[in-house]
Structure formats: C-alpha cells, structure tokens
Image (cartoon, rainbow, N blue to C red):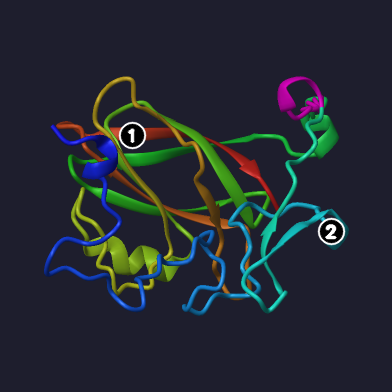
Amino acid sequence: MPSLSDALKKESPTGYVPTIPPLALPPQEMPGQTNSFKVNPWIRTPIPPTSAGPDTLRQFNDGDANVPRRRVLPLPVGTGQGGAAAVTNTTVVQAASSAATTGLTTKTVSYTSPLLTSNSTITQSLSLTAKSFQLVSVTANAPCEIRMYGNALAMAVDATRVMDAPPPAEWQNGIITDVVLDTAPYQWNWENRVGCNSDSPQTTNLYIAVTNLNSIPQNIQLSIVLLPLA
C-alpha cells in the first residue's frame, strides 16, 4: 500500500488541467447592499403615526450612495401600569323639570256625538287652546273609529277612504292620526304623535271624524288628552 505522501499528488491526473483563470466565488455581501434593483430612499417602517422627530430616528444607509434609506422609529414610552390609558368618567346629573317650570300642561278635550247609527260618521271641529299639540291618549265609551285632521279640506277628501285602508301616496293630505277602537277597553295611548292646524291663516281648530262601529245606535263620547305646544 502506497504511503500518504505518494497518494497525494500535486499534479493533476492525466488528461485534466486546471482552468485558467480559476473560477472566483461571488462576493459575500449583506442583503440590501449594492443591489441592482431600485429602492425607495424615503421608505419608512409601516407603523402607526408617532411623535418621534428627526433627532430620534435611527438611519441605515443602503448601497454606496450614502443616502439614508431605512428608518427605524424607537418604541413609544409606556405611560401608567401596563400601558393602559387613563379614563375619566364624568356624570352629569340633571334635575327633572316639572310642568310648572316648562309651562306645558296637558289638557283634556271632551266630545259627545249625537246619536249615530251603526257605521255612520259625523265630522266636527273642536276648538283648542293652541295651534299645535302633542296627542297623549284618547278614551271612548263604545267601539268607534277616530280620525283627526289639520284642516277641513283634508277631512272632506279623506271621507271616501274605507277603514284600515292606507291613504294614497300621491295625496298631500293633512291626516294627523287614524285610530280604530274595536276592543275594550276603548283607549289608545300615543308615544310621539304631534299635530297642528293647517288652515290659512292658522287657527286653533282640530277637525275630527267619528264613526260608530257598534251594531246599535250609539252616542260616542270621547275624552282626548293632549299637550298644547304653541
């Protein structure tokens, strides 16, 4: 067996010669240094806006142009324990206003119709103390339908509309409300129904149409609670 010095030869085997010039390894460069693609010299780390100024930015040059192209913002300084924000709750206590303070007091308007046969209607004009009002409730002594209007013309035009039928959309009507009381107790409470007189000139009249829904002749008695506004 040949010795190690004999096995290791400096010359190449027969038929093989070294390349001239020898192959060179690629340069060992860090990523982003002297690259061939175009980079944005004003690129920033995509983080939310902070109060950091130019003096607190750490800059890194990219390439041989010696131009700052990478900027890293410092971490924000935490305030309080665990970085939690302080929340201040403010409670506003407002004293309840009374009717004596606002000057608004509910009024009750009573109306009794003449003797009406079954399904007959009577129209009436009631005189109020204000030109506009907010309806609160109405109570009747028998089953009936109650319609309220802002003017007499609207009441006349709506007279042909049957019960529970909606008014046509193209009508410029002055209907304030339409309530059917067919189940005892004959009472209805409004939540946000506001009405006003639409006569020209404006008056304090409220126009109503009452229909007897009882199967026998009846004097319809109404008690309307409303809040005069102006």
In the displayed structure, does residue 1 sit left or right of residue 211?
left
Residue 120 in picture, x, y percent from top left: 22, 47
Amino acid found under the numbered disc labelled 1: Asn
Residue located beneath label 1 in the image: 219
SS state under label 1 = strand
Residue 81: say if magenta: yes
Which element type, helix, strand or loop, lies under badge 2? loop
Q: Distance between the residues labelled 1 and 2?
A: 85 Å
Q: Is residue 185 above or below residue 117?
A: above
Please tell me which residue is depicted at 75% across the width and 46% down the height of the picture: 74
Between disc 1 and disc 2, the foreground one is: 2
Q: Residue furthest right?
A: 55
Q: Mark 2 points at which residue?
A: 53
Q: In the rendering, at what x and y percent does residue 21 appear?
A: 36, 78
**Numbered circle sitting on residue 96:** none
82 displayed left or right of 186: right
Q: Residue at x 54, y 59 (%)?
A: 30
- Residue 43, by quadrant, is bottom right
Q: Report the front residue among 174 and 210.
A: 174
Residue 141 image point, x, y percent:
36, 26
The residue lying at 27 percent from left, 70 percent from top is 18
Q: Residue at x 79, y 27 (%)?
A: 86
Of pointers 1 and 2, the one earlier in the residue sequence: 2
Specify the quadrant that holds the N terminus. top left
Question: Which of the two residues, 29 or 8, is positioned nearer the viewer here?
Answer: 8
The magenta region covers: 80-93
Q: In which quadrant will I find the C terminus?
A: bottom right
Assess disc 1: are there few (<14), some (14-19) or many (≥20) residues with their C-alpha within 10 Å of its C-alpha.
some
